[in-house]
Amino acid sequence: MHRLRRLIFRFLFVWLIEGLSLGMMTAIIPGISFAGAESTPNLVIALRAALVLGVLNALVRPVLLLLTLPLNILSLGLSTLLVNAGVLMLAASLLPGLTISGWPSAVLGTIVLAVVNTFLTSLTTIDDADSFFEFVVEELSRRQHIGSATETERGLVLLEIDGLSYSRIRRAAERGLMPTVRDILRDGYVLTCCDCGLPSQTSACQAGIMYGDNHDIPAFRWYDKERGKLIVSNNFKDAAELNARYARGHGLLRGGSSINNLMSGDADKTLLTMSVLSDSREDLARRRQADLYLFWLNPYFFTRSLVLTLWDILIELGQALRQRLRNVQPRINRLSKGYPILRAITNVFLRDLGTYMVVLDVIRGVPAIYTTYVGYDEVAHHAGPDTSDAMNTLRALDQQIRRVRGIIARKAARPYDIVLLSDHGQSFGATFQQRYGYSLAQFIDSQVTPEVSVADMHVAAAGVGYAAALVAELRSMEQHAGIGRIGRATVGRARQALENRLERHAPPPAVMNARVTVCASGNFANVYFDLHAGKVSLNELNAVYPGLVDALAQHPGIGFVVAYADDGTPIVLGEGGARDLRTGTVTGIDPLLPYGDPELRAAQVLRVAEFPHAGDLIVNSTLYPDAQVAAFEELVGSHGGLGGEQTDAFVLHPADMRVPSTTNSVDLFRVLDARRSAAL
């Protein structure tokens, strides 16, 4: 009886919110008004309209969305606004007290209604998912059978904030940017700093977290000399190859769900996960398609996400202009290669989509759920990790955490632990080229003879990979949705147009026949020489390219260079000394001394240097006295190597979950997997 009373109260309360939202909509949009009899108050008309609109959203709108699916994909969801407007006009035709002058007013009305509804619900304890139509989405999601949802073990929800360091999330909570995180800490959770190890970038870190193994991932991108192939972590086929190395059925997400990640963790269900997007199995594609359809089904949530995405483009344009007017240094061109659109997709649309899918999986009772929020990392790369531009993205991320936490408390099908974590941090600084007037590849080119070709492997923005993942999921809808021959042809043209847009912003094709290949990842670079397969020794390099290694080690922008003795022993070379990584013998000044505990850093560098596909030379930038680094790519916020906060990840976890000191992200797998497997 208590539950029935609670449900009735929630129904009445949400009904009132919907009515107030409609009332505010009529006050804002000139072409929409209440025109009832004098004896009928406007509030009564608004409540009637809310009830009718709720019924239409539950019964009519899903049919319209299904019929307009090809156009919806073609317009990246913009046609959903027309569907929402049509439902609103249908409600007006059924209610004599609600008047709408035409389609323009109806479209504006649906936007305002979504924004107002979100604002009003944010002022209450009623989540914005509790509107009339939401029960339809929840029931449809429950029908999608997940076999492991019947298990009795405690569930685990992992929310990764890409690129956010330990000290920055702590400051964000203290300064009120993340009130939900602050409340979680007050409730007894513990914030633990974790060293993610080398390389400090997503593919290695997620492989470590999800599988407990990231062997032979030397960077975000590297060169396989034996195959003559460039490996790029966010290339779907390369990501699938990496994932297959470690996937043995024992991953952290076995029987669970992977959303907006690079690795899959052996998840049964994936969405926007790069390492499985090249998997053409129809059952996987249909499951992803079904979840995407549920996202389009929600009129307020989708409309709000679309509006906020467009608004975020304007925010980025304004922030870029402000940096330029104030002559903020260091800075990069934030308008190149369509970055404002890329930022909006990653910072808003994929953020909201990821949260929505996490919520559905929590309601289903999926045992392990992992999603990555990439917006902070993307903005921090271009604006700087400590800037207000980047830190303010955490406000919206905190709201996503609050939403997931609230759903777990009220609607979860099983008990869940919620764990916040990052894969790595970010470091700040003017780029190598900004400081010295040339890139690392150009400097190497200046040290060799003119006939020696040097290829500079530009690293595409990580956000491009996530945007491409969205396109790939749309392609899946094109191939598997029941939209008919004409629909498939229409969607095919739309998909091709989107792919062409991404290709225009892609880096130029790699020159694979170069004598020297430079692969940069933040302030960390692997350099390969074509003298022979396998590692090229320091003596061999000095014989063919005399003075090159010394010039690199003595450069003021380079903190250390790793080369190999004749027996394969990695040696760290710096301006004032050297270290044998196997014996620990230091000659002169230890080149690793500025980067923290030199023994820890030596072990981390040794591990990467002994990877089969690490470079013949490994180069790390200087760590300057102001704690800045110099990225070898044009990003003022960077990660991939050593120096600054890029190796300082975090885990926010229950107090009874002990997180020991870590030296690599693989150390987290055992901790998280043990927590997931704990009996109720």
Image: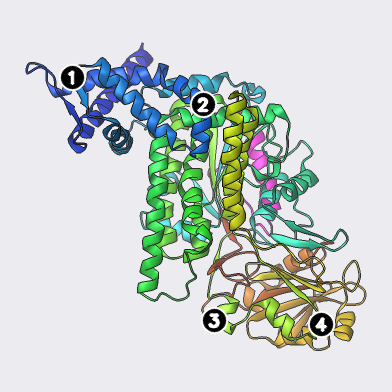
The reply to whether callout 1 and callout 2 are in contact (CB within 8 Å) is no
Who is closer to the viewer here, 12 or 446?
Answer: 446
Coordinates of residue 212 in the picture (x, y in percent): 73, 48
The range drawn in magenta is 656-680
Asked which secondary structure carries label 3, the reply is loop
Asked which secondary structure carries label 4, the reply is loop
Amino acid, disc 3 = Pro
Instruction: Name the residue located 40 percent from the left edge and 28 percent from the top edge.
Output: 83
Q: Earlier in the sequence, mark 4 or mark 1?
A: 1
Q: Residue 625 shows which numbered tag?
A: 3
Amino acid, disc 2 = Ile
Left or right: residue 84 compared with residue 675: left
Amino acid, disc 4 = Glu
Q: Is residue 70 magenta?
A: no
Asked which secondary structure carries label 1, the reply is loop
Asked which secondary structure carries label 2, the reply is helix
Q: Closer to the observer: label 1 or label 2? A: 1
Q: Closer to the observer: label 4 or label 2? A: 4
Q: Residue 97 shows which numbered tag?
A: 1
Q: Earlier in the sequence, mark 2 or mark 3?
A: 2
Q: Earlier in the sequence, mark 3 or mark 1?
A: 1
